[in-house]
Amino acid sequence: MVSPLFFRATSSIRWVGFLAIIATLLFAAMAIYTSPLEPSIPEIQLTFTASAFNAILAEWKPAGVHLFKVHFLIDYPFLVSYGALGYLISIKTRLFTGVAPLVRTLHAISLPVAAVADATENALHLFFLFKAGPVAQSLYFVAGTVVSIKWLLIVTFVGSAIYARYSKAAD
């Protein structure tokens, strides 16, 4: 007889695989769709002032700005998928076994928090794009700071995952 725990574990692994495929497809779609933009999306993400943000919009011209606006239709599902994927990888796989419970918890929340930061950045950028009047300079700084936190969390999670994977392979 097969244990019910087997089915839960199998189901969790299937969700990890499903979310990994969805996140990869969404990322690829977004990268292909926004590839004509020069400067690239990360460059506008890392602006901290209205003048820097608007300078990139000016370089993109109206067609590029339209691409940027539409890309959010892909970016929001992408951030949900990578946030959920990071949580499930941390909690439902063996990748981070052997680390302190607090560290495992921090790994589990890092990509969901990055996804919330990503959604906040997206909301601010959409606000900047569709504003009816002047925007407080501090909001551009907030957007740049939130993006920086997002990227720090993503890079830390990926680095930790690579380290955990290859340190286990060496054992």
Image: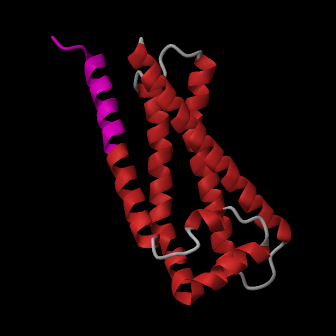
Quadrant of residue 65 within the rendered picture:
bottom right
Give the quarter of the image for residue 121.
bottom right
Percent from the top left, x then y, of residue 98?
50, 13
Quadrant where the C terminus lies? top left
The answer to whether residue 95 is seen in the rendering is no
User: Which residue is rendered at x = 45% and y = 58% of the image?
Assistant: 77
Instruction: Tell which residue pokes out farthest to the bottom in this image.
Output: 62
Instruction: State left or right for residue 156 relative to residue 163.
Output: right
Q: Position of residue 93 (x, y in %)?
A: 40, 25
Whole-percent x and y of residue 31? 43, 64
Q: With respect to residue 104, does 23 lie above or below?
A: below
Q: Is 14 placed above or below 57 here? A: above
- Indicate the colouring scheme: secondary structure
Q: Is residue 166 magenta?
A: no
Query: Chief secondary structure of the magenta span?
Result: helix
Locate residue 153 relative to residue 137 in the image: left or right.
Answer: left
Pick the residue in front: 33 or 86.
Answer: 33
Q: Identify the residue at horizontal 74%, vertical 55% (top origin).
A: 145
Q: Residue at the far front: name it.
A: 170
9 in magenta: yes
Q: Is residue 44 above or below residue 5?
A: below
Q: Which residue is located at x 68 percent, y 61 percent?
A: 46
Which quadrant of the rendered structure holds the N terminus? top left
> Which residue shows up at 79% across the image and 69% down it?
49
Stretch of the chain drawn in magenta: 1-18
